[in-house]
Amino acid sequence: MAPSPRDADPFLQNAMNDVSEAVNKTIDRLLPQTDLAENQLYEAMRHGTLGGGKRLRPFLVVHSAALFNVDPSRARRVAAALEFVHCYSLIHDDLPAMDDAALRRGKPTVHKQFDEATAILAGDALLTLAFEILSEPETHEDPRVRCELIKTLAKASGAHGMVGGQMLDLIAEDREFDLGTISRMQRMKTGKLMAFACEAGAILGKASDPHRRALCNYAFDLGLAFQVTDDILDVEADPQDTGKDTRKDEQAGKATFVSAMGKDQAKDRAEMLVQQSVRHLRIFEGREKMLKSLAEYVLERRA
Amino acid sequence: MAPSPRDADPFLQNAMNDVSEAVNKTIDRLLPQTDLAENQLYEAMRHGTLGGGKRLRPFLVVHSAALFNVDPSRARRVAAALEFVHCYSLIHDDLPAMDDAALRRGKPTVHKQFDEATAILAGDALLTLAFEILSEPETHEDPRVRCELIKTLAKASGAHGMVGGQMLDLIAEDREFDLGTISRMQRMKTGKLMAFACEAGAILGKASDPHRRALCNYAFDLGLAFQVTDDILDVEADPQDTGKDTRKDEQAGKATFVSAMGKDQAKDRAEMLVQQSVRHLRIFEGREKMLKSLAEYVLERRA
């Protein structure tokens, strides 16, 4: 079973469920079942993207976009594209040559359900599809906006962003990283894609620079807080709650925030980061309630 | 050593060398060496893209674009982006879970030179970088043109194109495909990316529909001819010439044009396809000489 946002207040919980449902429908429409000979590829893409996940990034896209009164159907398309990038990275990350994980969101990982080759191809196809979606007029009528979304997503997810962070993560297995390098690694691995989620709302809404920057800073701090709490959950949580293998980092000897600063200090750090993230949102003069609730949930979640 | 276009006439050979050199310089600039902790990722991206290859797709981009007097530096950027997509697909295709190849262009494949995880990530990063490059104003000042390039490349290389074709190719190991399915598979696997190469020139040049269609048809037939001759080379050629393992298809029991129709008929088919491809270019009234020479070279190449 997928983890539910059960630690969230009811107001946030409803909002998270709404985004999940809406984005699942969008994903389902973008990844139709086929009767093609290569249908296995589509099945693997669906397996890797549907049925589970907190949809944190889609939530950030949808509620950042709402600050600028963006058409929700456009925000959902961008949210789906971003979720495709996030899910492709999980599919590749779970491969035997990488984290070698058997479970994800309580289900067999894509290479377990299908095979390694199919998992590699499904990841490749999802990444490609993300950019296809963003390039189409349905995402925004202004091609300048579409190009800005594509450029920002590519930078956040490529060698200078998520993929580079994953490379560092692999290197971390054999090397001692200091806290500065761990922070840089996590900003690349998680933070930049979270920042894109919020920036995407601002780009779609043709927001002013200060508004875009505020959202970006919020997401960066939130992303880091998320990673710190992830590291804490990896040593504390019940696999039944998280739906994935725990203690993987410790077993792999990976440098994490917990290994670098201890659990208690890591908890303090997460709290500090969440407070800091929320302060960036003051520029929205009270309309940031949903994004603020999400930040508090990240701190309290148990999955 | 990389295969050289030694079967080409000197006129074509010079032109191919010119494109190779220029595109190598562009790739080298787009993939600088770094002193970052994750430098291994950039090294793997460089290993997988520099030093070898006929640069057939870049040639098609550059010389299609030349038909419409496109600024050559723009054509080279698109050529490099396309080559990144082609090379990422080779890196992933060579992985143990896919074709399990040790040699490519006479050098160790990326996962042999580095490791599997690095090869997966280097492929992911190259695919992402391709879209980043196309989204930037240096590629074309009109964002409509950039979006059209991105959409066309994504369609050609994703689940409905190259990646779908590779999925079919894997399925072909266990199933008997008829000639129609083999043709469809090859059009997806090779044809659509070749078609993009030529279409890209037309898109950059804001060409008329008939011109764009003519180039697309030329490339489709040429791509199929290329695949047929590839299948023939796989059973005939010396690995010293091709710089990669041969007879891989036969060993894997894969359905190829040679297995489906025999070598002699395959040779006739390739010749017919090349003649057909060149006929589409008549619309250019004599300015298509370079693309015509290339088609003839595809038929005669020994590597």
Image (cartoon, coloured by chain):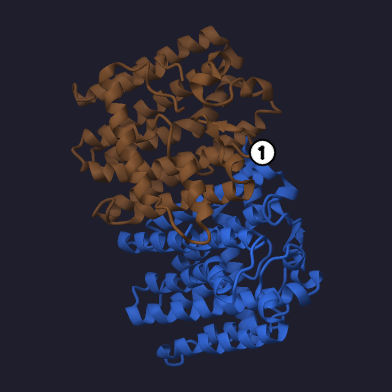
Chain colours: A blue, B brown
Q: Quadrant of the C terminus of chain A?
A: bottom right
Q: Nearer the viewer, residue B177 or B249?
A: B249
Q: Quadrant of the N terminus of chain A?
A: bottom right
- In the image, taking residue A51 as reference, residue A246 lies left or right, namely right
Q: Nearer the viewer, residue B90 or A44?
A: B90
- Is any part of residue B157 visible from this angle? no
Label 1 resides on the chain identified as B
**x and y, in percent, of residue B104 in the image:** 53, 32
Q: Amino acid at mark 1?
A: Pro
Q: Residue B66 occupies which quadrant of the picture?
A: top left
- In the image, taking residue A138 as reference, residue A16 lies left or right, namely right
**x and y, in percent, of residue A84 in the image:** 55, 58
Q: Residue at x 26, y 33 (%)?
A: B211
Question: Which residue is under mark 1?
Answer: B96
Q: Residue A255 occupies which quadrant of the picture?
A: bottom right
Q: Residue B155 occupies which quadrant of the picture?
A: top left
- In the image, taking residue B186 as reference, residue B111 lies left or right, namely right
